[in-house]
């Protein structure tokens, strides 16, 4: 099955700075859900863009064939952590077609907020 | 009326594990809203992709001509139920053009959260 | 300025059935935000698709040149009202290019929920 | 890196009229997140469309090379402020490819609501 694109961008990016809720599921986080429906490993390079300094990356993620990866930006730490409470954007370059969707769970407040959107795919 | 595509993907997928609210409308659920605006029956095969095991499917759904189907992933059970609290992705293959939109209602907490996005359409 | 498409679909559709909040701004509603950036009047025909009965329409909306229209589905009443608590989809056919975005405000509960997505554009 | 388009539209637009929460992060706001992944400055002209009066603009924004800009519509004031509690749409014209995503934080109520979607890209 051959579905997706090799180049994706998420222009919105923001990890909420605190979270009264401390379970893994309900902790504030920002995620890129990556579907690799192909029969090949997807080697993905992620670059993070900031408002006032040079881009950071590549962060490297491998998604096995026929697998999904719900990647939390909070968990990226090589080459460095993404700071909380800081606007950023991200670009994904994959060697096989993948599908990328952006999701944030914001639990700064007792009542959580959720957002999602398909990312921007380019050729 | 001929609108839509035959191949769609939703990279995000997650059925919240519990729901204090137990009415049908407010129970936590994840849905794919499928519009078949054509004059032909749409026969749709859905494949579910996981992070750490083989894809499961096809799940088969038929949408009559000129009808919409707001399909809850919670309700799929053949070949098997989709487990709650587990990241997944989904791919839709239809024999006629359809339009697919992804929606989740999360009522784990007293104040519900909602997300939606157009799915990813491919050629 | 020539931006947009003539054919759009929103596969998700649902008007929440009640609303403790009764101001116009915070009343539960579902909207299609339509931008007509062209210098011509946009004559739009909307068809509503249901799960278990024939489509209803056309509903006719005119958006003046260089104007936006945040249309509430709740307000449509010719040829008939859209019932609340009922899944539907919508298709928009315009004679000039427009841009359509889907938004719902759900105030069934005290804490409102919001969703939005770009609609599906076809050629 | 060459990703994005030069022409974008956000059909939805609405700045909530009040905000009990008064920190910068949690104040009600509407944003366009703009990624310029290119090596050139992006000069962007924004036009605001209303329901019942002539469009206003251009608002001019410059995004440096390899930078993101999370622009709050609330902050635009030249040629004029965008009124709160008023439906609008926006069009973005850039001289280099950019990616635009729409986000709103609505904190009219104690429990905030969030929405996001990729904007509409045109050629």
Image (cartoon, coloured by chain):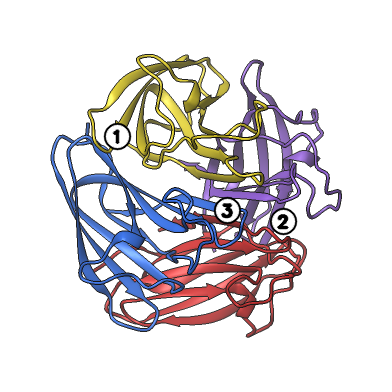
Chain colours: A red, B blue, C yellow, D purple
Q: Where is residue A36 in the image (x, y as percent from the top left)?
A: 36, 73
Whether residue D90 is visible to the viewer of this picture, yes or no, is yes
Q: Furthest-left residue in view?
A: B40
Local packing at callout 3 (Cα closer than 10 Å; few below 14, some 14-19, many 20+) is: many
Residue highlighted by disc 1 = C50
Image point (54%, 57%), residue name? B107
Local packing at callout 2 (Cα closer than 10 Å; few below 14, some 14-19, many 20+) is: some
Q: Distance between the residues labelled 3 and 1?
A: 25 Å
Residue C39, above or below A15:
above
Q: Which of marks 3 and 1 is in front?
A: 3
- Residues flagged by tags 2 and 1 on a common chain: no
Q: Disc 1 sits on a residue from what chain? A: C
Q: Which mark is residue D64?
A: 2
Q: Furthest-right residue in view?
A: D22
Residue C7, above or below B46:
above
Residue D84, above or below B47:
above
Q: Quadrant of the N terminus of chain A?
A: bottom left
Secondary structure beneath dot 2 equals loop
Question: On the image, which quarter does residue B75 sit in?
Answer: bottom left
- Residues flagged by tags 3 and 2 on a common chain: no
Q: Position of residue A11 (x, y in %)?
A: 60, 57
Residue A9, above or below B51:
above
In this picture, residue D44 sits left or right of residue C17: right
Whether residue B36 is visible to the viewer of this picture, yes or no, is no
Q: Where is residue A117 in the image (x, y as percent from the top left)?
A: 50, 54
- Residues flagged by tags 3 and 1 on a common chain: no
């Amino acid at each position: 099955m051959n579905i997706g694109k090799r180049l994706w961008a998420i222009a919105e990016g923001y990890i909420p700075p605190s979270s009264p809720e401390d379970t893994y599921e309900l902790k504030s986080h920002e995620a890129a859900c990556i579907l690799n429906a192909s029969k090949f490993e997807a080697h993905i390079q992620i670059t993070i863009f900031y408002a006032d300094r040079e881009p950071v990356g590549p962060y490297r993620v491998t998604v096995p064939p026929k697998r999904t990866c719900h990647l939390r930006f909070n968990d990226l730490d090589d080459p460095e952590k993404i700071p909380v409470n800081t606007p950023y954007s991200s670009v994904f370059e994959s060697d096989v077609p993948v599908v990328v969707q952006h999701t944030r769970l914001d639990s700064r407040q007792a009542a959580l907020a959720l957002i999602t959107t398909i990312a921007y795919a380019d050729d």
